[in-house]
Amino acid sequence: MKLLLSLLLLFSFANAAGVAMDEKLGAMIPLDLKFMDDKGETQTFKQLMHGKPTLLTLNYYKCAGLCTTELIKLAETLEKVDLKEGKDYQVLTVSFSEDEPASLAAHKRKTIFSSMTRDFDHSAWNFVIGKNGSSKKLVDTVGFHFEKSDLPSAIMQYTHATGVIVLSAKGKITRYLQGVTQLPLDIKMAVLSAAKGKVTKSIPKQLQSCSDFHPKEKFVLPIEQIVGAIITLIAIAFFIRLLLFNKKNRVTLTKEEYYRQEEEKDLKKKDKED
């Protein structure tokens, strides 16, 4: 089972190439966008934020690849953040696939909370699904891109970038924390800056996306680098083998020449004696 999951994640990484997140710092989220929560109830984006700086993630709940890993890692990080969820910040996970039912949002919510090892205010993290094109408007506003995957739908329906989009209490995009994993200090500083409405540029790093996981600050699994490294190692191994082979041949050739020269000396010596 672990091997299967690893393969699924690898497939996810390798197929997210070219899917990135265009940072739109300072842009405002339309707060009247409506979403369906895990109970099937409709709430506006403003209601879901509860007037707090908000950490936004965009995923889809059927994802068999990186999405769950990204959310679980975020949960692990939030457990270590020196801030109080629900008081200092909110977390909002939105499915960009509007054909998903509320039951999937509820299941994902349960999965993520069950992975946490400390009491976490469940009301501080909502899992919702777009309604009437609201998720499309949201992803366009934040510069998030996704596309249909070439892999079987049972493995992965979409390839997309990964990361956390940080919003001020008024819905302004103040920072992007791209990639699958985040540092507790980065989360804390991003939330504190968002509380002041301060826009902060992202720190460039190797991106990972749902799938390097192309998943892309861009999180894309560095497939090209890996392939390049493998090719380089093969070339080095071939070169070393070639050198050893030539050295062996040179040693053998030297011995043959030595014996041939000795035979020629013996023949010349005999000729003189005759």
Image (cartoon, helix red, strand yellow):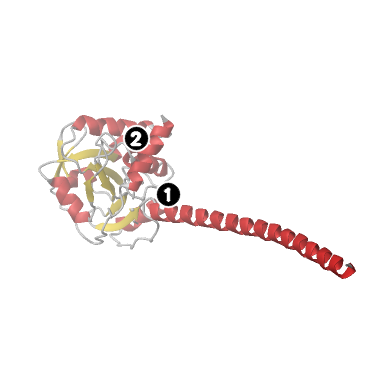
Between the C-alphas of marks 1 and 2, the distance is 17 Å
In-front residue for pair 59/34: 59
Of all residues shown, which one is farthest toward the right?
Answer: 273
Q: What SS does tag 1 mark?
A: helix
In-front residue for pair 249/182: 249
Using a 10 Å C-alpha cutoff, classify the residue at mark 2 as few (fewer than 14 neighbours), some (14 to 19) or many (20 or more).
some
Q: What SS does tag 2 mark?
A: helix
The quadrant of the rendering that contains the N terminus is top left
Answer left or right for 14 relative to 183: left
Q: Are marks 1 and 2 in contact (CB under 8 Å)?
A: no
Name the residue located 72 percent from the left edge and 59 percent from the top edge: 256
* Residue 148: quarter of image: top left
Across the whole image, how many numbered discs are drawn on residues?
A: 2
What label does residue 184 carry, if any?
A: 1
Vertical relation: 148 (above or below) 232: above
Query: Where in the figure is residue 250, as x and y percent of width and height?
Result: 67, 61
Q: Which residue is mark 2?
A: 112
The amino acid type of the residue labelled 1 equals Pro
Q: Nearer the viewer, mark 1 or mark 2?
A: 2
The quadrant of the rendering that contains the C terminus is bottom right
- Asked whether residue 119 appears in the rendered view, the answer is no
The amino acid type of the residue labelled 2 equals Ile
In-front residue for pair 155/102: 155
Query: Where in the figure is residue 211, as x and y percent of width and height?
Result: 32, 45
Query: Where in the figure is residue 100, as x and y percent of width and height?
Result: 18, 35
